[in-house]
Image (cartoon, rainbow, N blue to C red):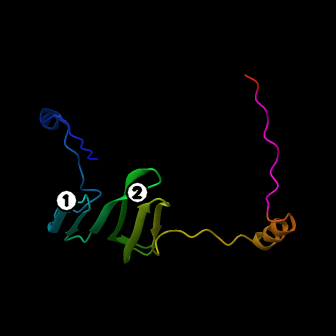
Amino acid sequence: MVLAAARPQEEIAEASPVIIEEVVDANSDIIRMESVQNEDGSFSYGFETTDPIVQDVSGQIQQIGDNPGVVMTGTYSFVAKDEDGNDVPVTINWTAGPGGFQATGDAIPQAPEDPNAEAQAQAYAAAGGVPQLAEPEQVVV
């Protein structure tokens, strides 16, 4: 299965310019840009800029349930400022596939530990490992 999207070129000429100076240093240059599309449907692409932003992605077609899908892995990195204005390198590694999108990295907030986790586990075990759910309301249409 192949999917492509495009728009007429005349719309590009009529479109308003996008100002990106606030997001990306307008003086940054692309120092690496790669893109590979293989006959089996697998692919990879990546780029690196002088400001520095780096992204690398790879993917392949896999059977997901009854349908084919695309499974991808990637990483991106950039430099952010901390609360004192110091440069801090940020790297995020991610996967996207049957389990959904999953990202890891020091910059991703972590959920606090659940103070009730032990009590919930004990209650779950006491119920025979079957959660006790409330009966669903019946809706009359």
SS assignment at label 1: loop
Near-viewer residue (10 or 50) = 10
Q: Is residue 28 something that shows in the picture?
A: no
Res. 15 image quadrant = top left
Q: Earlier in the sequence, mark 2 or mark 1?
A: 1
Res. 61 image quadrant = bottom left
**Side of 117 relative to 15 (left or right):** right
140 vs 58: above or below: above
**Side of 85 relative to 119 (left or right):** left
User: Which residue occupies 75% across, 70% down?
Assistant: 117
**Side of 52 relative to 114 (left or right):** left
Within-10-Å neighbours for mark 2: few <14, some 14–19, many 20+:
few
Give the residue type at disc 2: Gln
**Percent x, y for residue 31?**
14, 70
Asked if residue 137 is among those painted magenta in the image, a careful observer would answer yes
Farthest residue toward the top? 141
Q: What is the chief secondary structure element of the magenta stretch? A: loop
Q: Which residues are magenta?
A: 130-139
SS assignment at label 2: strand
Quadrant location, the C terminus: top right
Near-viewer residue (74 or 2) = 2
Asked if residue 121 is among those painted magenta in the image, a careful observer would answer no
